[in-house]
Image (cartoon, grey):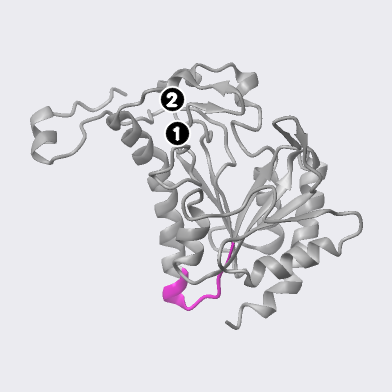
Amino acid sequence: MARPVIDSLTCARARAVCTAPLLGPDDPPPFQVHHPHGRSPFVLIADHAGQQVPQALDGLGLAQAERDRHIGWDIGIAGVTLELARRLDAWAITQTYSRLVIDCNRPLASPTLIAPISDGTVIAANAGLDAAARQQRIDAIHAPYHARITAELDLRQQRGQATILVAMHSFTPAMNGVERPWHAGVLYHRDIRLAHVLRDALAAEPGLVIGDNQPYAVTATSDYAVPIHGEARGLVHVELEIRQDLIADVRGQHEWAQRLERILRQLAPQFTAI
């Protein structure tokens, strides 16, 4: 299937950037929805679940081994998210493309929206992007992914359906040569309602070390999902980070999904009446 021909005069009249679509007919869609009719109050989103690269970008000029690293995706989080959604009967969405193509948990003005370097790896295909190429990635991946989340949250609001938003992430066990001691981290910005009780519940689990806004902290300039889908709507929400070596295989993914199901079910009644 040939790419559509876009008339330059039409583009100019529309005052739009004239670019061909980034995703071709053989590229997967930018997101997948799981359990679309889930009855749970929980909504699970995984901004960095996938590691696909559009064919037009030719692997970003990186070897597969580089794209398989933590810089390319949140290792293991797709498996945890899908298993947790199944256990909770929760609506969930997983983003398909590598965070190196575009980071769907970054505001559009963020300098790391399309990172030219990540943990020492230079991404040559991201260097010196012009406005048109940058907008092409936003339009193909970032915008439709977040539009789908917005549409679901709007629908739940219209129904009067209780909603608790959980942003699912994972983190590398070591960064810049420094080992990270946390098994998981609970992240938040201004709204601590769910974050603090989830932090305490996880910390009460035998053998777990839980980070309080570690290894990252949410801010309005570094994050997108919590400020836009959580705080701006007034939804009860939390961002959860799990260390990647603990969920790199199916066994670990199911173990964490089982733990989170148990804890989240216990906590939900505190918030569904809000």
Is any part of residue 8 visible from this angle? yes
Q: Depth check: give the residue in front, 145 or 62.
A: 62
Specify the farthest residue to the right: 206
In the foreground, 111 or 18: 111
Q: Is residue 178 magenta?
A: no
Q: Which mark is residue 33?
A: none
Give how far apart the Cα atoms at labels 1 and 2 are. Answer: 6 Å
Percent coordinates x, y for residue 85 in the rendering? 65, 57
Estimate the x, y position of residue 241 in percent, counting from the top left: 68, 50
The answer to which of 88 and 106 lies nearer the viewer is 106
Query: Is residue 164 inside the magenta stretch?
Result: yes
Compared to residue 95, the image places residue 190 above or below, namely below
Viewport quadrant of the C terminus: bottom right
x 76%, y 35%: residue: 178
Dot 1: what SS?
loop
Residue placed under numbered mark 2 in the picture: 126
What residue is shown with label 1? Answer: 114
> What's the magenta region?
156-165
In this image, 47 relative to 20: left or right? right
Check the image and report above or below for 212 versus 40.
Answer: above
> Where, quadrant-wise, is the N terminus in this rendering?
top left
Side (left or right) of 89 relative to 23: right
Residue drawn where x is 37% and y is 40% of the image: 138
Name the secondary structure under disc 2: helix
Q: Amino acid at mark 1?
A: Ile
Residue 250 in percent (x, y) is at 78, 41
Q: How busy is the neighbourhood of tag 1: few (under 14 within 10 Å), some, or many (20 plus)?
A: many
Mark 1 in CB contact with mark 2 (< 8 angstroms): yes
